[in-house]
Amino acid sequence: MEEGTANITIDRYAKLVKGSWFSQFHNGSNPWMARYVYGLMFLIATFLAWAVRDYGHGALTEMKRLEEFEGGVDCLGTEGVLRVSLGCFLFYFVMFLSTAGTSKLGGARELWHSGWWFAKILLMITLTLLPFFVPSAVIRLYGELAHFGAGVFLLIQLISIISFITWLNDCCQSDKYADRCHFHVMLLATIAYVVCILGVILMYIWYVPEASCLLNIFFITWTLVLLQLMTSVSLHPKVNAGFLTPGFMGLYVVFLCWCAIRSEPPETKCIKKSEGAIKQDWLTIISFVVAILAIVIATFSTGIDSKCFQFRKDESEAEDDVPYGFGFFHFVFATGAMYFAMLLVSWNTNHTVKKWTIDVGWTSTWVRIVNEWLAVCLYIWMLIAPIIWKNRQAAESSV
């Protein structure tokens, strides 16, 4: 959402309330502040799942029913993550069901979304504790469903990112900003391509120490090929999307490739280890914290971007329209709960995960790689789909 649009929407909401600052917060209804509170609750749930995984084995062992989980005691931490994730998913799914379809401010569902925090905190605590008293078979079933839910989250996030990149490019190419933004567009595109090439070179240096690292060579080389493919399609005369969008998409694709290779098991010979053990420990902790924050930020930013999924764009907005889709917002957080569970268990619910690690293992690597390839396919499709649609309409009209 553009900054100017956000300010206008805030002004509309302030006029609708027609009350003082005290009355607005006394009623507890502020959808703009509410989204940050939901993000904070999601962050707490994510750190709780990590704490249960790495440090909750003693408490979980006391629960006899957990011993039935496939893999024995070593998998108690994994099941603890799934139980916390299930509680978080249930909370946001309940919020999704109770707020879906909300279109106007001031209604009962909007007040429920933006207020009643004491009741919702109690609901969150209750639903977080509830999964610790259900049979392990239910948790195993949820673990399988979480693979699908996490995939849905990745797809939604991918569409949101591509939509933002194309919106930025369309904005810069519009008649209003074309002259003023031409230099900035070329500068940003050049920087993006330089960073992409530099990233590819560094990955070759860091992750291909031997000629036998054929898989990493394939991942990196294919990423370079995909970058060239996106650029060629974007610059095709019938597409004419410029350099900016493939440059930014190249950044995202190179980042996904780097994440995929970083997810390879640390004992792999193609992954160089740091020489200082203490430095490596601190690096691992910092990387873990950054990864957790990245999950929350990605979930939050995707959740408020409901407009890119509207098939019918309505440019005119009434003063009492909601600033973002409440139902979609909670649905993204519900799938995000499944996503952070998969990252914390490395997409494998039947093996032990080391402390202070996230998204490590061959399953995680291939999930990232497939996500990268899917991103390129989806981006190219979004470029050529309008051309195919126009050609089909032209063919039908000529008949």
Image (tube, rainbow, N blue to C red):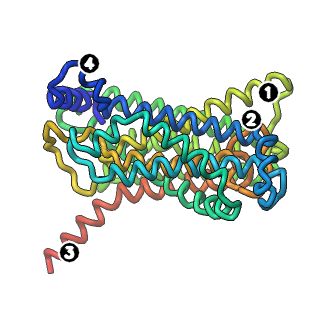
First of labels 4, 3 by sequence position: 4
User: Compared with residue 144, is residue 165 higher up or lower down, i.e. above or below?
Assistant: above
State yes or no: discs 1 and 3 in contact (Cβ < 8 Å). Answer: no
Question: Where does residue 71 sit, x and y in percent of width and height?
Answer: 82, 58
The amino acid on which the numbered mark 1 sits, given as a three-letter code, is Asp
Spatial CA distance of label 4 from label 3 is 62 Å
State yes or no: discs 2 and 3 in contact (Cβ < 8 Å). Answer: no
Spatial CA distance of label 1 from label 2 is 9 Å
- Residue 356, label in figure: 2
Crowd rating for badge 4 (residues with CA inside 10 Å; few <14, some 14–19, many 20+): few
The amino acid on which the numbered mark 4 sits, given as a three-letter code, is Phe
Crowd rating for badge 1 (residues with CA inside 10 Å; few <14, some 14–19, many 20+): few
Q: Which residue is drawn at 83% across and 22% down?
A: 278
Spatial CA distance of label 2 from label 3 is 58 Å
- Decide if residue 224 is in sight here: no
Query: Image quadrant for the N terminus?
Result: top left
Residue that mark 3 sits on: 395
Residue 97 vs residue 301, the one in the foreground: 97
- Decide if residue 390 is in sight here: yes
Q: Which residue is farthest bottom?
A: 399
Disc number lying in front (1 or 3): 1
Spatial CA distance of label 4 from label 1 is 48 Å
Residue that mark 4 sits on: 22
Disc number lying in front (2 or 3): 2
Spatial CA distance of label 1 from label 3 is 63 Å
- Residue 281, label in figure: 1
First of labels 1, 3 by sequence position: 1
State yes or no: discs 1 and 2 in contact (Cβ < 8 Å). Answer: yes
Question: Where does residue 262 sit, x and y in percent of width and height?
Answer: 70, 42
Q: What element carries label 3?
A: helix
